[in-house]
C-alpha cells in the first residue's frame, strides 16, 4: 500500500513535469539518432539495388498452343532482373549467383536481402493458371453446360499448383522492402500472364471479359529466416547506445531523490510509518516503468534509423526484458549516489562523474579485448546488459544463450539495490 | 509543599548538561505545578544539540508536555525552537539528553507510537506536482489509512482550511497562504494525538492566519490532542497556550501559564514613554524608580517602559517626576502586559530582535 502510494506519487510527479520528462526521454533518443546517422546512414535517401538470389528450379512446360517448351521461371527471373527504380535506369535488384545449398549462408551473412525459390512445377502451374483463366472467362459467357460441345477449342484446365518462396530475415530492413517489392512483381507477372491469355481468347471470342481476381495455381509464401548477421557498424553500436541511454537514468534518479531530501519532503515521509524499503522500492517501481518505456523508445529510434535487429519478436522481448533489468540497475545506482549527495547539484555532478566513465568501462563506445578487464567489468550489470543485448538483437542468440547474462544482471542488480537501500537508509532515512 | 495548581518558583542548582564540561550557573526557572501533574505526552531531559562548527542550538532543555494541553514554545528566531521540535519528533539526534514520548525514548519508540505524532514543519513542505487532495491522501497512505478514510479526512481538512475549491489544484499553483494551510492540514490527516505546529502562522496573510488560528483553537478546545506550538508571535502564544516555555539561545528561561508569566514580571499595565531626547532616558528611569508603586522602569529601544498597577492613575505623578528631572515627553501610550514584556524582562531584548 505505502509502496504503491510512493510509486504512484513518483509517477505522477514525473508525468506532470513535462519539460523534464521530455528532456529525459529525448536525450538518449537524440543521442541514438546522432550515432545512427554518424555510423551507417551515409547513403540514406539513395536508391540502391537489393541483392537477391533466385533459385530457379522450374523445369518448364510444353505449350500446346505454341507447340514449344517454355519456362515461366526464366521469364520471371528476367523480369526481376530488368525492373528499375521509378524514373531511373538503376536496377531494383542485383541478382546474385548461388546454389540452394549456399543460399542459407548468403542470407545469414546478409550477402543477399532475400532468396527467391521458384519451384519445379512453376511453369506448369502458370500454364494451368492461364488455361483456367480462359476457361473461366469463356464459361462465364456460354455456361458450363455447353462446354462439352466446344471442348475441342477450350484449353485443358490442369491440376498443378506451385508456391514461390521468398526467404529472408524480418529483422533486416532490406528484406522487408525487397520481399514486398518481389511480391508485387510476382503479382503483376501473374496478372500479365492472365491478361495475355485473355488477349489470345479475344481473337475467337470478342466478348470475353478480362481476368477476374481469383488466382489459382500460383501462390507466394514469405519465409522468415532469423539470426542473419548484421551489415552495418551501427548494428554493433546500437545496443551499447541503448545501455548508455539507460545509464543516463542514473542522473535523473539521483537528482530526483536528492530533490526530495533537499526540499524536505522526505522528512515528512521519514516521520510516518513508511520504511526505507517502501520508499526506495516504490521509487524503483515507477522508475522501472519509465525505464521500460525508454527501452522501447530507444529501440524504436534505433530501428527507424537503420538498426537491423535479428531474431524477430522473440529476441525483441528478451532485449526489452534485459533493458528493464538494466534500467533497475541504473535506478539502484542512482539511489546509491543520492545517499551520498547533499543536494541536487551534487547528485547530478556525482551521477555524471560515475555514469559517463562507466559507459566507457562497460564497452558502450569501445570494445575491449577479452581479458581480466572485461572479466571484471562483467561484475557490472550494464556490461552484462550490453553483452545480452548484442547477443539477442545483433547475433540473434536464443533465450538460453543470454540466460546467464540475465541471471548475472539480476544478481548484480539485487546486490546494487541492497547496497543502495542500505546507504540511502543510513544516510537519509535516519535521524540526522 | 505548594498547593495544587498554584504557581511555584524553583531554583535549579548547577546542572551539567552533558554536551559540554562546564557547569551552568544556577538559574531561576519558574514552573507551574500543573505542568508536572497528569500524564506526560513528551518529556525532554537535559536536551542538548551542538551542530558541527560548535553552534549550540539547544542547551540543557528539560520540560514535560502534558497530554491534552496546548504547549507554547516562545522565543525569537534562532532561539532553538525548531531544533528542539526536530529532536522531539525524531528527525534530529540530540548531542546529549533524551526525549521520551509517552514514556518511551523517541529513538526506540515503536512505529505505532510515532504514528501518534503529526508535524507541521516551519518550512512549507508539500509535493508541488501533486494536487492538494493527493498531498493529503499520500500522507494518509503513509500512515496506513484506508483509501476511503484518507479521502474522507482529506476532504474534511480541505474544508476546514478553506481549500475545498483547490482540492484538485496542483500545490504549485497555490498562493503562499494556501500552501501554508495545506502544510498544516498535512500534519493532521492521520488524526494524530500529538500535533506539533512549528510557526504555523509565519508569513500568513490575515485571512489565512485567521483560518489556521481558528482551527488550532478548535483543536485546543477539544482537549483531546496535545498541541505543541512554536511561535515568535507573542499574541498567538498568549491567546492559545495553556502553558508557555520561553526559550532563548537554546535555554529555557521561563515555563508557566501565560497569565502567571505576565503576573510574575508585575501585575498591571505598561506605560510607554517617548522622550524628546532619548539620551535623557537614564535620567528619566532613575527618577521614575523613586515613584512609589512603580515595579519596573526600563529603556527599550528609544522608549522608556514603566510597569505598575493602575499605571493610568499614576500618569500625572509620572509626568511631574519626569518634568522635575528635566526629561521632556513627546508621546505616551498605555497597553496591557504581554508575553513580550516577560521576554524583555528576562533578556533585555525584544522577541523580534
Image (spheres, grey):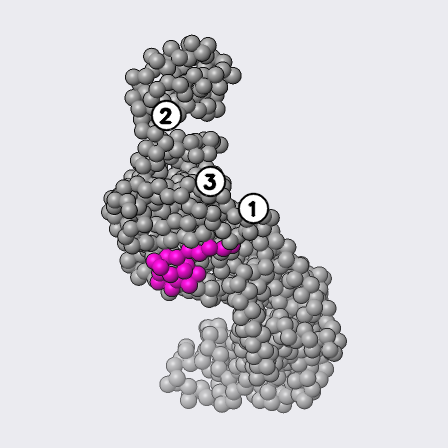
Q: What element carries label 3?
A: strand
Q: Mark 3 points at which residue?
A: B248
Residue A60 on the magenta span: no
Residue B295 image label: 2
Image coords of residue B216 (percent x, y): 31, 43
Q: Are marks 3 and 2 in contact (CB under 8 Å)?
A: no
**CA–CA distance between discs 3 and 2?**
24 Å
Image coords of residue A256 (percent x, y): 53, 56
Residue A230 image label: none
Of pointers 2 and 1, the one earlier in the residue sequence: 1
The chain that hosts pointer 3 is B
Crowding near the residue tagged with mark 1, few <14, some 14–19, many ≥20 C-alpha atoms within 10 Å:
few
Q: Can residue B144 be seen in this view?
A: yes
- The image quadrant of residue A377 is bottom right
A349 horizontally vs B216: left or right: right
* Residue at the (44%, 42%) spot, across then down: B27
A180 horizontally vs B202: left or right: right
Q: What stretch is highlighted in magenta?
A: B95-113
Q: Is residue A8 visible?
A: no
Say which of A279 and A389 sits in front. A279
Of pointers 3 and 2, the one earlier in the residue sequence: 3
* Residue at the (28%, 52%) spot, across then down: B38
Say which of A65 and B311 sits in front. B311
Q: Name the residue under label 1.
A: B55
Amino acid at each position: 500500500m505505502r509502496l504503491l502510494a510512493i510509486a504512484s506519487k513518483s509517477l505522477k510527479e514525473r508525468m506532470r513535469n513535462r519539460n523534464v520528462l521530455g528532456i529525459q526521454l529525448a536525450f538518449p533518443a537524440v543521442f541514438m539518432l546522432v550515432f545512427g546517422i554518424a555510423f551507417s546512414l551515409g547513403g540514406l535517401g539513395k536508391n540502391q539495388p537489393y541483392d537477391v538470389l533466385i533459385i530457379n528450379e522450374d523445369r518448364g512446360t510444353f505449350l500446346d498452343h505454341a507447340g514449344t517448351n517454355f519456362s515461366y521461371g526464366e521469364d520471371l527471373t528476367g523480369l526481376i532482373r530488368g525492373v528499375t527504380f521509378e524514373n531511373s535506369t538503376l536496377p531494383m535488384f542485383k541478382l546474385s549467383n548461388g546454389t540452394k545449398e549456399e543460399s542459407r549462408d548468403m542470407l545469414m551473412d546478409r550477402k543477399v536481402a532475400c532468396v527467391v525459390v521458384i519451384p519445379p512445377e512453376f511453369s506448369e502451374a502458370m500454364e494451368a493458371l492461364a488455361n483456367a483463366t480462359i476457361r473461366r472467362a469463356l464459361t462465364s459467357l456460354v455456361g458450363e453446360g455447353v462446354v462439352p460441345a466446344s471442348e475441342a477449342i477450350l484449353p485443358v484446365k490442369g491440376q498443378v499448383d506451385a508456391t514461390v518462396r521468398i526467404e529472408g530475415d524480418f529483422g533486416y530492413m532490406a528484406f522487408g522492402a525487397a520481399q514486398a517489392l518481389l511480391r508485387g512483381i510476382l503479382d503483376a507477372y501473374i496478372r500479365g500472364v492472365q491478361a495475355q491469355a485473355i488477349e489470345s481468347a479475344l481473337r475467337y471470342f470478342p466478348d470475353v471479359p478480362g481476368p477476374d481476381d481469383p488466382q489459382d495455381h500460383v501462390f507466394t509464401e514469405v519465409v522468415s529466416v532469423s539470426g542473419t548477421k548484421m551489415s552495418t557498424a551501427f548494428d554493433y553500436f546500437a545496443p551499447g547506445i541503448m545501455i548508455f541511454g539507460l545509464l543516463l537514468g542514473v542522473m535523473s534518479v539521483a537528482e530526483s531523490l536528492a530533490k526530495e531530501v533537499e526540499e524536505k519532503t522526505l522528512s515528512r515521509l521519514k516521520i510516518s510509518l513508511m520504511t526505507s524499503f517502501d520508499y526506495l522500492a516504490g521509487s524503483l517501481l515507477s522508475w522501472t516503468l519509465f525505464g521500460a518505456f525508454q527501452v522501447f523508445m530507444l529501440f524504436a529510434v534505433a530501428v527507424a534509423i537503420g538498426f537491423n535487429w535479428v531474431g524477430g519478436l522473440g529476441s525483441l522481448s528478451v532485449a526489452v526484458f534485459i533493458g528493464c533489468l538494466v534500467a533497475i540497475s541504473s535506478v539502484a545506482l542512482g539511489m546509491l549516489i543520492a545517499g551520498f549527495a547533499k543536494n541536487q547539484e551534487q547528485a547530478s555532478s556525482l551521477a555524471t562523474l560515475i555514469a559517463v566513465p562507466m559507459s566507457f568501462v562497460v564497452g558502450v563506445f569501445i570494445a575491449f579485448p577479452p581479458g581480466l578487464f572485461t572479466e571484471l567489468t562483467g561484475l557490472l550489470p550494464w556490461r552484462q546488459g550490453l553483452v545480452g543485448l548484442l547477443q539477442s538483437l545483433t547475433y540473434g542468440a536464443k533465450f538460453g544463450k543470454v540466460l546467464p547474462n540475465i541471471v548475472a544482471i539480476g544478481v548484480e542488480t539485487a546486490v546494487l539495490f541492497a547496497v543502495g537501500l542500505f546507504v540511502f537508509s543510513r544516510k537519509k532515512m535516519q535521524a540526522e | 509543599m505548594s498547593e495544587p495548581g498554584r504557581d511555584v518558583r524553583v531554583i535549579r542548582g548547577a546542572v551539567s548538561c552533558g554536551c559540554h564540561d562546564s557547569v551552568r550557573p544556577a538559574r531561576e526557572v519558574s514552573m507551574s505545578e500543573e505542568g508536572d501533574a497528569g500524564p506526560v505526552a513528551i518529556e525532554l531531559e537535559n536536551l542538548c544539540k551542538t551542530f558541527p562548527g560548535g553552534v549550540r542550538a539547544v542547551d540543557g532543555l528539560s520540560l514535560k508536555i502534558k497530554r491534552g494541553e496546548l504547549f507554547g514554545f516562545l522565543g525569537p528566531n534562532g532561539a532553538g525552537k525548531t531544533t528542539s521540535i526536530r529532536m522531539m519528533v525524531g528527525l534530529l539526534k540530540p548531542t546529549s539528553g533524551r526525549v521520551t514520548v509517552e514514556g518511551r525514548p523517541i529513538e526506540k519508540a515503536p512505529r505505532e507510537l510515532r504514528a501518534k505524532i503529526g508535524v507541521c514543519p516551519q518550512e512549507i513542505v508539500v509535493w508541488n506536482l501533486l494536487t492538494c487532495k493527493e498531498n493529503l491522501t499520500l500522507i494518509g497512505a503513509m500512515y496506513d489509512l484506508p483509501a476511503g478514510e484518507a479521502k474522507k479526512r482529506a476532504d474534511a481538512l480541505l474544508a476546514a482550511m478553506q481549500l475545498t475549491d483547490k482540492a484538485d489544484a496542483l500545490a504549485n499553483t497555490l498562493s503562499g497562504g494556501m500552501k501554508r494551510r495545506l502544510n498544516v492540514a498535512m500534519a493532521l490527516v492521520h488524526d494524530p494525538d500529538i500535533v506539533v505546529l512549528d510557526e504555523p502562522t509565519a508569513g500568513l496573510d490575515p485571512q489565512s492566519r485567521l483560518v489556521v488560528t481558528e482551527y488550532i483553537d478548535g483543536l485546543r478546545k477539544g482537549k483531546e490532542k496535545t498541541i505543541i506550538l512554536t511561535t515568535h508571535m507573542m499574541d498567538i502564544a498568549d491567546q492559545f497556550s495553556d502553558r508557555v516555555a520561553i526559550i532563548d539561545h537554546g535555554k529555557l528561561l521561563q515555563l508557566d501559564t501565560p497569565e502567571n508569566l505576565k503576573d510574575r514580571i508585575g501585575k498591571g499595565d505598561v506605560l510607554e514613554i517617548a522622550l524628546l531626547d532619548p539620551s535623557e532616558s537614564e535620567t528619566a528611569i532613575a527618577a521614575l524608580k523613586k515613584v512609589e508603586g512603580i515595579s519596573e522602569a526600563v529603556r527599550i529601544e528609544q522608549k522608556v517602559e514603566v510597569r505598575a498597577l493602575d499605571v493610568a492613575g499614576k500618569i500625572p505623578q509620572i509626568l511631574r517626576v519626569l518634568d522635575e528631572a528635566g526629561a521632556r515627553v513627546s508621546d505616551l501610550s498605555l497597553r496591557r502586559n504581554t508575553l513580550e514584556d516577560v521576554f524583555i524582562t528576562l533578556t533585555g531584548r525584544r522577541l523580534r530582535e
